[in-house]
Amino acid sequence: MNSLIWLIPGAPLIGAGFIILLGNRFTAQICARIAALMVFISAILVISLWATLLAQPHEASLNQPLFQQSLLTWMSIGNWQVHLALSIDKTSLIMMTVASCVGFLIHLFSIQFMKGETGERRYFFYLNLFVFGMLSFVMAHDLILLYLGWEVMGLCSYALVSFYYQKPHYAYCGRKAFVVTRIGDTALAIAIMVIFAQFQSIELPFITSQVGDQSITSNHLTLIGALLILAAIAKSAQFPLHVWLPDAMTGPSTVSALIHAATMVTAGVYLLIRFYPLFELVPDLQLVIAFIGCITAFFAASAALSQNDLKKILAYSTISQIGYMFAAVGVGAYGFALFHLIVHACFKALLFMSSGVIIKAFNNENDIRKMGGLGEKMPFLRYSYLIGSLTLAALPFITASYYSKDPIIATTYTQHFGFYLTALALLGALMTGLYAMRMYLMVFTGQARSEIQTYLLTIGMRLPLALLAFFSITIGFIQTPWSWGPQLLIPWLASDLGLPTLPQGNAERFIDILGISASILGIALACYFTPKEIKHQQGLGNITFLNQAWYIDLLSMKWIVVPYYYLCSLCRVSIEKILLFMIVESSIIGILRQGHHALNYAQAGQITRYLYFICIGAIGLLAYILMTIYPIYE
């Protein structure tokens, strides 16, 4: 298998190259099928890695990959060489499985969903390139390839968010997503430079094995960790750099599924997990990560409560759920962070792809207040969306997120300031149940509040939804909290990520009961209040403060973006117009004009003037020779 590892990220890249170079010779649907086939090849190869691993168990760690393949020597300076290589350990294998398998289901769903859309070939080109970027990022053996994958995802997200670029607002949203995430890209680039300066290496296994070296000062570790946190916050849309993600809903719903579930926003979580040995040496930074995660989980859940745009509800839910993953990383529960990432990929892809069908069924209407009654028209979609909504709400004992999210809440209690972290996480869980069930009830129950257009779900669309709904329930049973139940994932990851610390005795049972109660109470409150909101057109959707997401976006525009525009205007006037144009440019022009006049005078065509200059030149040359032979000063 080592010789074929390159094909895992390579197949989607080949598909993207085929579409961009030869796509015009084929129909858009053929290009769509080729794109899906390329990601399917990646998924099959990843599954074969699992089969190889299970047939011949390997002992591995972050510093000893399970599989590895060298690609090429990118740079050679003396004895120092940079080898671009791919390596796979248990953590990256799980991320590869999510990116390739969920990515394939999104491609398969997109074949019919995007049929007939303007720019269909362009869509599948960027979709293939997106999967290549994510797979390169998680499989990178060195920081150069990791950064390449990171940047490719940023480019593709910009292109796909502004897919309908003919509409100015959609193009603006794409630019906003690109600019905000560039903050994280810049932070990661600086972090890589500092890492190289300190470790004299860009190979990830070597770096993680040497972070405890006494020659690396705590100040440098803190700087590197802070830069990595900033990069992860921007990429994974955590508070306060979350503002780009709600506006990134302007692309097709399948794009949202790919960005939110299988690729980009989970990249920040993976980055922090990959560098966890560094963070464990700087506990203060771990605490910062935990608080950022819990605050984001609480804030985004409260904002989702009052959203009326279907896709914005899901966007804020993504921000909130990623917050739980950050909290897990911050408290050292790396395995639970990865577990919740897997579960989140399944139910969030299910919800976003289903929301795309819902919006088309309501004639491109996104406002859930204008929906309703869809359950009778599309029963398959109703039940698949119900499974996704209940999994988002973490319905106890049945859905997978109960087994992945509730342990994260429990682990937060074992840390410093654990009471505050757990309280924020529990409040977020309560509100998650409320907005998840409100969203489902507003769309599928009651009378239709606008015209419903018949939308045929083909087998190519039903199959991905059915598989994702199935895994949204069953995948949680690979890691149950009971001693007599399966506990397959966390012990298996222990060699890479260690074991999380859970509360013991009464504290564990009490927090578990609180987590169960929060989810059930949230669902119950939604079932009580949502019918009243539908009937009276007054409810959670009318709370302006929450609907505007605490006005953070507006405040950032007022206090950051607008002053920046004024600063740019000031620089344009003072530096560009006055310094460059009026002083520097005019001076250069004046010098050139004077030189032109002098040259024009010298080349006037008069022989006497030429003889005059020759004599002056000859006298000057003779004076220089005499001064050289007989220097004035000894």
Image (cartoon, rainbow, N blue to C red):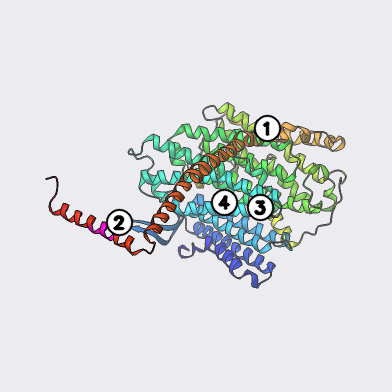
* Residue found at the far bottom of this picture: 25
Q: For the residue labelled by badge 4, is the local secondary structure a helix, a strand or a loop?
A: helix
Say above or below: 80 vs 402: below
Which tag, 1 or 3, sits closer to the chain's start?
A: 3
Which is in the foreground here, disc 3 or disc 2?
3
Cα separation, mark 2 vs mark 4, equals: 34 Å
Residue at the disc numbered 2 = 79
Q: Residue at x 67, y 43 (%)?
A: 246
Residue at the disc numbered 3 = 162
Q: Amino acid at mark 2?
A: Asn
Which tag, 3 or 2, sits closer to the chain's start?
A: 2
Q: Position of residue 486 (x, y in %)?
A: 58, 45
Question: 30 or 261, which is in the foreground?
Answer: 30
Q: Position of residue 469 (x, y in %)?
A: 70, 51
Q: Residues within 10 Å of mark 3 (few under 14, many from 20)?
A: many
Q: Quadrant of the C terminus?
A: top left
Q: Residues within 10 Å of mark 4 (few under 14, many from 20)?
A: many
- Cβ atoms at labels 1 and 3 below 8 Å apart: no
Which tag, 3 or 4, sits closer to the chain's start?
A: 4
Q: Amino acid at mark 1?
A: Trp
Q: Hey, which quadrant is residue 127 in on the image?
A: bottom right
Magenta region includes residue 444: no
Left/right of residue 600 with respect to residue 621 in the rendered view: right
Residue at the disc numbered 1 = 550
Q: Over which residues does the magenta segment extend?
A: 612-618
Which tag, 2 or 4, sits closer to the chain's start?
A: 2
Q: Residue at x 58, y 40 (%)?
A: 569
Q: For the residue labelled by badge 2, is the local secondary structure a helix, a strand or a loop?
A: loop
- Cβ atoms at labels 4 and 1 below 8 Å apart: no
For residue 154, which numbered disc appears in the image?
4
